[in-house]
Amino acid sequence: MDVTADTQTTITQPEYHPRVEDEALVRGHGRYIADAPLPNQAYAYFVRSPHAFAGIVSVDIAAAASAPGVIAVLTAQDMDGVGNISRHPPLPGRGGAKLFVSHRPALAGDRVMHIGEAVAMVIAETAIAAQDAGELVNVEYEALKPVTDAREALKPGAPQLWPEAPGNLAVDWPGPASDPDANAAEVERIFASAKYVARVYEMNQRLIVASMEPRGATASYDAARDAYTLRTCSQSAGTMRENILGIMNWPKERLRVITEDVGGAFGLKTSAYPEYIALLVAAKKLGRAVHWMSGRSEAFLSDNQARDTYSEVELALDEKGKFLALRIRSVGNMGAYLGAIGANIPTISFTRCLPGMYDIKPIDISVKCVYTNTLPTAPYRGAGRPESSYALERVVDEAARVTGVDPIKLRRRNLIKKSAMPYHTAVGTTIDSGDFAPMLDKALELADYANFKRRRRQAQKRGKHRGLGICCMLEHSGGSPVESAMLDFPGDGTLQFRLNVQNTGQGHATVFSRLIAAQLGIPPEKIPHRHGDSSNELPGYASVGSRSAMTVSHSVVKAIEQMLAKARPITAGMLEAAEADIAYQNGQFEVVGTDRRVSLFDVASHAAALKKRGEIAEDLDTKAVTETPQTFPNGVHIAEVEIDPATGGMAVIGYAAVDDCGRPLDPMIVEGQLHGGIASGLGQALMESAVYDADSGQLVTGSFMDYAMPRADDMPPLRDAMHNVPATTNPLGIKGVGEAGTTAAIAAVMNAVADAIPKCAGVHLDMPASAPRLWAACRRAQA
């Protein structure tokens, strides 16, 4: 669908207004996983492996089974009918090879593949009794040598995790070119004749998501209907149900998934985990509801993790600094099992961000996805986009050093011009809209770039190093195009809207009720929001990938159009007028040129009565399903840092950001999403890093004592602005925004670090830019 700006629907809303969700949440009236116990529910505790890689010799459950309050102890032998929990779309490999999807069990049987893998489940009358009995489960292991680094896992002689994946290679992805070999040869030809070649080798370290509310679920079974209910934290109850149905090979009638409030998700809670499947099996075996709530320490050992990619990036330039070609070779750490779309993150999601804001036609990229004895990597805020932006922006800064051209002038020289839109990329995407040069100018103004050299001199007088880093970011949003919305009239003077995507903090009830109110001219208070129930039968995907606003709004607009179209002939009958003479505005249908009118709600009630009598086939309840092409949010972010060479201590002194999210549905929520995304990016750049011991495979950073998270005083003053160019791929011109801040922040901060430390001593620093690393780099500069 290609909707031009001239035909886009207008959004008329006040600039700022309070979110309708917040009062209940701040008063403690939310309903999270632990807030809705079922009558007579039992409690589960999972016995987890202390080894990263080991054979299971035996599991002795006798002592645990006879412990006080214990109802049952289940092991792998009890997981009847459970399929592979790793479910992944096909991904073609080099030479026609296919992605190997390892089998992930609900409970480990023959061997364990990562630290914390569940081996047994103890079910008791209380959570404490289950945990106490879990200590009595005696598992005998035969420890094996693990491998945790993806590059090490590829080397000859490395421990082999899966016989079906020789060399631990899940897939060698050759990139999106139709003929990868010919494409690689052409790019090599360009590099061989280029005046300049810039090279960087960079690591995107592994991250732990650490959402406010850990994962949890309550499973129950109805023997009369042979059907299950799973109440769990998810990013779409419908998506979670579809995932579990595939694992269990059930028809949809056998499972209902319910999600209420969710305390943060960021991709972590998209798909099914082993615990959810084990709970469903247990609920049927016991004939009781079974509840499990992860503890924080348990989450460190059982939640999907993120990032963990290594990239070698090369950029060819001519004598004037024109970008000629880009080449990237990456290695992605999948963990022991494939997480939800895990292999798509360092491959497809990474590549779709290229060539960023820059006019680079020839691109050669290939990625090796590798199994290791670590937790699976899966979507987390950005999911390939921050990694891509970081790789590109670090090599552009390196190109500025190689050519001697100012980094800002070099970027400006290579920006895609507005007149080139829509821009067809070398990776098969089409950037539909954008206006990059003015964004760069506006960001430089916000950052007070004109006076930066003066601030740097002042810092030098105080013995500090000051640097400025820039990131020209372009990402993609809306990777799964199908989404739906339902409008229905319950007969109480309200218009309900139902969604498949789950609100996990984005403000869906606020945003979409006000959108519908603006479209229909009725008060938003009359438009309650319903979601989190797979029985709504709404097709679509989860609230991930910055897709919800653009895809849901498209479906909402279509549903309104269809609903009003159904209402007109009914209204014409009610008002005894020709259908062509019926007009709608501000909640009323009227006969044009007269004072005869009837409200939308009265028409809905009349339509419901007609349908009940069999006089019409449909009332005004309307479901719309749409397909929305991807959009390309973009922005220019500039970070300014100051480093104390004596201690390695660093502060982000200032941060300026100019972003394009298309047409914002709610400016306040857009601003909040950007600030939250920037905080996530700063966390990765400055302090966050999940570290595994190379010899034992133990998670070294297994608690907040060792895994640092950003706090309020780590946040710099933020100066932000919008330069929005409406998308042409959906009716409201919306682009995503939830991941933009994260995608831009890490490169902006790390480029600022490289700029700050003299003599290029900070150019090749890996994240996080911790005090010891910065101190060592400053020492190298002094030497």
Image (tube, rainbow, N blue to C red):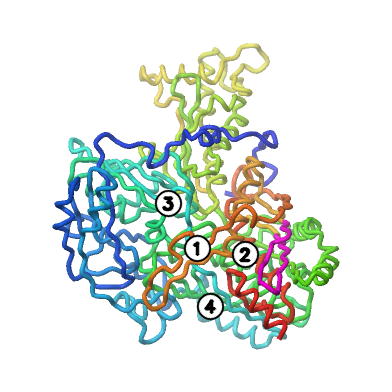
Tag 4: amino acid: Arg
In the rendered image, residue 629 lying in the magenta stretch gets the answer no
Q: How far apart in space, not on screen, are marks 3 and 1 (Cα)? A: 21 Å
Can residue 623 be seen here? The reply is no
Mark pair 4, 1: CA separation:
29 Å
Left or right side of 131 for 501 = right
**Does label 1 or label 2 sit earlier along the sequence?**
1
- Which numbered marker is on residue 329? 4
Q: Are marks 1 and 2 in contact (CB under 8 Å)?
A: no
| Residue contact between numbered discs 4 and 2, judged by CB atoms under 8 Å | no
Q: CA distance from mark 4 to mark 2?
A: 20 Å
Q: What residue range appears in magenta?
A: 637-656
**x, y (%) of residue 396?**
68, 73
Q: Which residue is mark 2?
A: 746
Q: CA distance from mark 2 to mark 3?
A: 24 Å
Q: Is residue 94 left or right of residue 439?
A: left
Q: Vertically, is 216 above or below 429?
A: above
